[in-house]
């Protein structure tokens, strides 16, 4: 019987499918719950940060901006607001106000008019560090942190088309050439057009027009022994530099406009050479772009002006972001200003500034169309003067036309012996500042009085040098400064009245007559402030304006009455922590119109 091999089938034994499905479902549910919780947490936290939990409520960051860049800063502020920034548990809102820099400076240092200007700003975007330096010179406590540049713009010479073409096709010019060029009767002959006569450049007051201030600084740098910047206070006392300053001031057109913007308008209204009374004006490139495209007026001019770059070192406006300090600036505003400044410096926001006509590192793109502007590369940049020297340049310019009559009244009370910084007394610093001012003054009149107690019989004041032309009594003034010596008390108000009455008697018509007081203490005896105020009101004479400006040293001066004294007479009050700030404060004060 045959045997058959049994046929066997391989059978796979496995786990049943339904338990696996159940386990998988449980795992998916668990993972889904964890993921949902995690995502929900992120969404909750983001919502809380952006809108939900500003535990301290809203906070407003107010920024005052120079008109040149205000529109762009507003655009950046809107972009930042879209991110719903939260700082110190505050939801931050940004308000940007377009306001001229000289108005901001005056308001911050001499009294802010909230009715006209709105509330005081927490930060300030201006066109040049010159303004931050002026703020520091008048009251350093108002500066919240070191200013940082957010953009740049070179200084150009703006002219109508035909004159601009003549300059560009000729030998060109350097800022340091301006005194010789503008002083010649046939200045246009250098550019092949002697028939055009004088090459005249409008130089609006550098105390309020920073393009002028920077052009003057560049011209002075070229007149120095090294032929380049930075300009220093020592250089300002050199004869070649003072001669350059005198020549520049003397070559100003009789009807120099008050502002760069007014000068551009006059140049554009009639493009014939010198039809405006001058041939050209220094401008920031961004302001020329705004003028030619009608950004501020809404209507472009019929004929644009053309920007010509000077040879040699080019002065550059650095558009600093200036954080402010004061009892109106809270911690939230301090941190918000820091955060907004950093946002301004990000590449995307820098491109917004570039589109507004400014120069930034993030892009080389330029706005189009941009009539009259070549956007030429800057290869040689002027190293700017330090903060103190910048004030002295403006002061020297203000005295260069012989139009200032200044008498300085110096406190020689015992407290002037106190430390003034760097191991020197307050009096040492005052004497150094006054001597420097005498040496740097180009022209104008200057006199020197001191006050304390019983300096001239029972009088608490004494004239050391009669007010007269600096050029003819420079050594007498230096000798008078050297004789200043701390003595006893501080009879300030009696001395101010006596000097005011003398200045009235000797008033010089057609000039800026002013008194400058340097003091470090409270009034001690003699007239009270109320009595002084009444006496000044009675003594005033129509048409004889005499500004009384005060530089207050140290922590003890009576700031409130001193501020009122300055304000009521059209002067200014500057407050310096110690003697090291006197020189810059004096320069700033003398440069003010």
Image: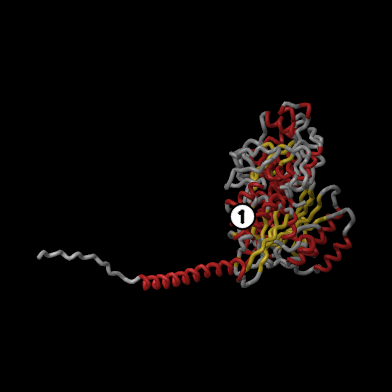
200 or 301: which is nearer to us? 301
588 or 66: which is nearer to us? 66
> In the displayed structure, does residue 409 sit left or right of residue 333?
right
Residue 434 in sight here: no
Which image quadrant for residue 158?
top right
Q: How many marks?
A: 1
84 or 580: which is nearer to us? 84
Q: How crowded is mark 1: few (under 14 residues within 10 Å), some or many (20 or more)?
A: many
Image x and y of residue 41, in percent: 52, 70
Image x and y of residue 27, in percent: 41, 71
Residue 72 in sight here: yes
> In the displayed structure, does residue 356 sit left or right of residue 472?
left
In percent of the image, x 82 and y 68: which residue is there? 530
Q: In this rendering, is residue 357 above or below 1?
A: above
Which image quadrant for residue 75?
bottom right
Which residue bears the numbered disc 1? Answer: 344
Q: Is mark 1 on a helix, strand or loop?
A: helix
Residue most extreme to the front: 1
Image x and y of residue 146, in percent: 60, 57
29 or 86: which is nearer to us? 29
Image x and y of residue 493, in percent: 79, 64
Which quarter of the rendered picture does the N terminus lie within? bottom left
Q: In this rendering, is residue 509 above or below 322?
A: above
Coloring basis for residues: secondary structure
Q: In this rendering, is residue 102 above or below 294?
A: below
């Amino acid at each position: 019987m045959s045997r058959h091999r049994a046929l066997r089938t391989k059978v796979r034994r496995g786990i049943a499918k339904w338990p696996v499905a159940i386990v998988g479902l449980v795992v998916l549910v668990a993972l889904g719950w964890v993921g949902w919780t995690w995502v929900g947490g992120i969404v909750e936290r983001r919502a809380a940060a952006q809108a939900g939990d500003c535990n301290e409520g809203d906070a407003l960051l107010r920024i005052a901006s120079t008109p040149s860049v205000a529109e762009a800063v507003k655009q950046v502020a809107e972009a930042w607001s879209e991110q719903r920034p939260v700082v110190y548990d505050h939801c931050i809102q940004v308000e940007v106000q377009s306001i001229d820099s000289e108005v901001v400076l005056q308001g911050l240092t001499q009294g802010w008019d909230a009715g006209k200007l709105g509330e005081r700003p927490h930060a300030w975007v201006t066109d040049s560090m010159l303004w931050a330096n002026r703020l520091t010179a008048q009251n350093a406590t108002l500066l919240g942190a070191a200013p940082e540049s957010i953009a740049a713009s070179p200084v150009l010479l703006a002219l109508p088309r035909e004159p601009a073409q003549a300059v560009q096709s000729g030998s060109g010019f350097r800022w340091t050439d301006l005194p010789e060029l503008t002083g010649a009767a046939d200045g246009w002959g250098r550019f092949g057009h002697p028939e055009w006569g004088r090459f005249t450049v409008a130089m609006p007051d550098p105390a309020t027009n920073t393009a002028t201030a920077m052009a003057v600084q560049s011209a002075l740098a070229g007149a120095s022994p090294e032929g380049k910047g930075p300009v220093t206070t020592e250089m300002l006392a050199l004869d070649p530099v003072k001669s350059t300053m005198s020549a520049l001031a003397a070559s100003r057109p009789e009807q120099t406009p008050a502002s760069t913007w007014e000068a551009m308008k006059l140049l554009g209204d009639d493009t014939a050479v010198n039809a405006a009374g001058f041939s050209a004006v220094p401008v920031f490139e961004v302001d020329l772009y705004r003028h030619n495209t009608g950004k501020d007026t809404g209507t472009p001019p019929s004929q644009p002006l053309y920007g010509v770059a000077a040879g040699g070192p080019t002065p550059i406006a650095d558009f600093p972001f200036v954080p402010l300090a004061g009892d109106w600036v809270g911690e939230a505003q301090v941190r918000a200003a820091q955060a907004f400044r950093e946002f301004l410096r990000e590449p995307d926001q820098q491109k917004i500034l570039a589109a507004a006509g400014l120069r930034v590192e993030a892009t080389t793109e330029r706005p189009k169309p941009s009539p009259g502007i070549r956007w030429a590369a800057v290869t040689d940049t002027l190293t700017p003067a330090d903060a103190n020297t910048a004030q002295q340049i403006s002061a020297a310019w203000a005295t260069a036309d012989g139009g200032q009559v200044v008498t300085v009244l110096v406190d020689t009370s015992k407290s002037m012996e106190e430390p003034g910084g760097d191991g020197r007394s307050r009096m040492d610093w005052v004497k150094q500042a006054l001597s420097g001012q005498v040496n740097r003054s180009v022209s104008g009149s200057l006199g020197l009085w001191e006050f304390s107690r019983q300096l001239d019989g029972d009088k608490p004041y004494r004239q050391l040098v009669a007010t007269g032309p600096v050029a003819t009594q420079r050594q007498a003034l230096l000798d008078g400064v050297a004789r200043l010596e701390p003595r006893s008390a501080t009879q300030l108000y009696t001395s101010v009245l006596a000097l005011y009455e003398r200045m009235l008697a000797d008033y010089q018509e057609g000039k800026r007559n002013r008194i400058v007081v340097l003091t470090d203490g409270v009034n001690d005896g003699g007239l009270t402030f109320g009595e002084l105020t009444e006496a000044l009101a009675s003594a005033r004479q129509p048409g004889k304006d005499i500004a009384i400006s005060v530089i207050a040293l140290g922590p003890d001066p009576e700031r409130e009455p001193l501020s009122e004294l300055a304000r009521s007479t059209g002067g200014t009050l500057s407050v310096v922590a110690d003697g090291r700030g006197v020189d810059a404060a004096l320069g700033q004060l003398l440069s003010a119109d």
